Image (tube, rainbow, N blue to C red):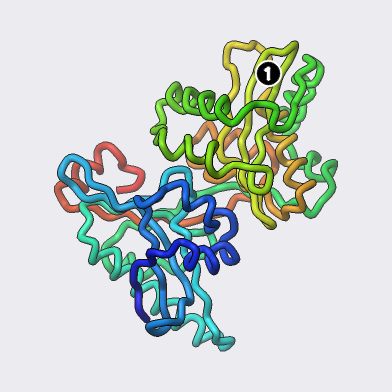
Amino acid sequence: MILKPINDIALFTEKAEAAIGVFGSKKWLSVYGERLELIGIYKDEHQLIGGFYFFKTRKYGFNFVKLPPYTPHCGLFFVSESKNRSSVNNFSKEVMNDICAYFTEQKSSLTILAFPSDIIDLQPFIWDKYKVIPNYTYHIGLNKTIDEIKSNFDSKNRNLINKAIKEEILVSQDSMRREELFKFFKGTLKSAGANVYEEELKNIFLQFSDASNSFAMIANKDNKFYGAVFCVFDKNNCYYLLGGIDKNSGIQGVNNLLILKSIEKAKELGCTTFDFEGSMLKGVEKFFRSFGAELIPYYTVNKALLPLEIFLKYKKREIF
């Protein structure tokens, strides 16, 4: 097995998009420019069988390895040609051993990465003294009718949706310019105290987003803006990426209605899954849970230099 950087983004995305969808597409990864490290997994010098990506940055004199902003995982994919279960397990273990060794060789002061939900063998990272932490998201299967999907909603959720409809909140698709959406979500993230990553956020709206990969649901009443949800999608999955409302409107259920309309749109597009794309904050998790979705685990790996880890145990006890 050979792991080495890939400079040709088209070479990487040719295989990555087929394996992991929109977060492996050329348009999405181009959002990050030259800051993104693309790593190929080769069976030999020329046969590319997988890959992954990450950000390598430097701050306060420390080197950091982390996920690209707004991307849910490191994009890991690899293909085994074997059909024997033991051989498949051995191959997977070899790949994960090599990936773990690759990250350790980066000599990062702090490494924080998430893996796709289908990657469950993180034992090599545990053996190498990384902290392996379960995280969760929620999925809604879209192979049922909308009425069947809504029947799984919490009754309070359905009541809030009905309130928003009775208040004559209207939801339209892509009725705001992308520049306006960027400004709105930039402000929403700032007011929530979240990291904004302004350059990448702007690139998502102004370079990546088009009708083939994303949509925005906009809530209005009497020509007044009440909120928006922005989703990205591929042929299988639709991801809730960003959402926000006017908290001073006094109208309940706007966000609930926006998500319902987003689920309906995802089903219309032929997607098989609506992914809430991470649900670790207690209040957010409760809200997403009210849509009757299935809880899905995925894993993060974290490692820091000992003095930094001791500090982070006080600031980020949940991951260290």
Q: Quadrant of the N terminus?
A: bottom left
Q: Is residue 112 above or below residue 198?
A: below
- Residue 165 position, x and y percent, is 79, 21
Q: Is residue 246 left or right of residue 308?
A: right
Q: Is residue 300 left or right of residue 24?
A: left
Q: Is residue 297 left or right of residue 199?
A: right
- Residue 104 position, x and y percent, is 25, 65
Q: Is residue 314 above or below residue 191?
A: below
Query: At 77% from the left edge and 53% from the top edge, which residue is drawn?
Result: 270
Disc 1 marks a residue whose amino acid type is Gln
Q: Which residue is under mark 1? A: 252
Query: At 55% from the left edge and 48% from the top edge, which residue is drawn?
Result: 137
Query: At 40% from the left edge and 36% from the top edge, which residue is drawn?
Result: 197
Q: Give the total of numbered labels.
A: 1
Q: Secondary structure at mark 1?
A: loop
- Residue 139 position, x and y percent, is 64, 49
